[in-house]
Image (cartoon, grey):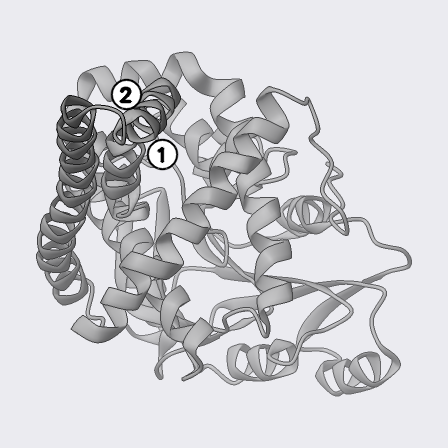
Amino acid sequence: MGQGDSIPLSVVIPSYRGSRRFLELVDKVVNDDYSEKEVIVVVDEPLPEVLQELKKYDGTVRVIVRNGRHGKVSALNQAYRMARGEIILFLDDDVVPSQERFLEGIVKAMEGYDIGDVRKVITGTSFLARMVYYDYVGFNYGNYLIAKRIGRCIAFNGAAVAFKREGLDKVGGFIKAVSEDLETGLRSYVVGLRFTYIKDPAVLNDPPSSWREWFGQRVRWSIGAALWVKNNWRLFLRIVKENPSLAALVVLLLFPSLASMVAALLAHAELFDKLLWLLFLSLSSYHPAFALITLAMSYRFLYTLLKALVVSLISFVIFSAYFYKAAKATGMRFNILEFAAYFFLYSPLWLTMLLAGFIRVLVFKKTDVKGWVVKG
């Protein structure tokens, strides 16, 4: 693409205080050789050293400094209203471009589309980073399939997403919500925006730095997802009815341990059966018939346990094949040992937290998220 026919592009980077990647991201975007670009940075309560570094970009970056924490949605919408580009690329402050000529690649990928979910690749070698990596294999492949089969967005990962200006105008900007990316993505489905999954170029995405940070993030995600489903359940039923096999596949890609967890729950004997087994066990010393009954019930319990184990192993084999295919389709890696840890340990933990979030919202009506601000 030559400089003479460049499409005006606005790059928006919201940040709270300024993360480790923030200044690196700003520098890479500023020095990208795409000619028709503007860079807008919105920072709540910036650290003094961050503010000092941003002064280097006077004249090349529009810096909006806000006292107090107003939240990500507010930052996105404020920048969106200021942006002059035909395409607006929103980047979180914990991502960086994966390659040169990144902005040109985004503009090319958006030809013929209104919204594009950019591929995210988790960095790092820690156990947590390697587990989160497979989360993103599922996220990426889910939107790859949705874009390919439906061509409209149901949800996107807000760490890196591009909109045509006119498309975002139709949506009305970012929806005020705990998970603004889920709500805004679904709103784009309602208004009929053309959706694409952008495999290349991609962004490198930092994982949470600790399990404590991961826990806080997943609490927010689970509450946001519960509110998303609560607010839009009629639309979800319609989408599922229109695309049942795709909906089931995407859910299982996001939570591969779901089948195993359901099987394990169904495999447990009822409390009455266990009490009856204890009674027959107690009576076995009085008559051999009771001993035979107790033995038969013991085998039944063992059978249900083995059945759950078999279901888990079969599920692991099936999902290993699916995730291998997903990784290949989205240009990501796959390691069977890492995936085993993800499938049997990490995914059930994340699924448990998600279900707890739904109970928190739907049963206890608790929708607040500690440390997270939601303003329009």
Q: Which residue is disc 1 drawn over?
A: 154
Q: Which residue is disc 2 drawn over?
A: 239
Instruction: Note whether 160 is above or below 268 in the view shown.
Output: below
- Quadrant housing the C terminus: top right
Q: Nearer the viewer, residue 291 or 328?
A: 291
Question: Residue, x 59% and y 57% (percent of image)?
Answer: 215
Q: Residues within 10 Å of mark 2 (few under 14, many from 20)?
A: some
- Residue type, label 2: Ile
Q: Are marks 1 and 2 in contact (CB under 8 Å)?
A: yes
Q: Position of residue 330 (x, y in %)?
A: 20, 63
Instruction: Note whether 375 is above or below 293 in the view shown.
Output: below
Secondary structure, mark 2, is helix
- Quadrant housing the N terminus: bottom left
- Residue type, label 1: Ile
Secondary structure, mark 1, is loop
When asked about the image quadrant of residue 64, the answer is bottom right
Q: Position of residue 11 (x, y in %)?
A: 54, 63
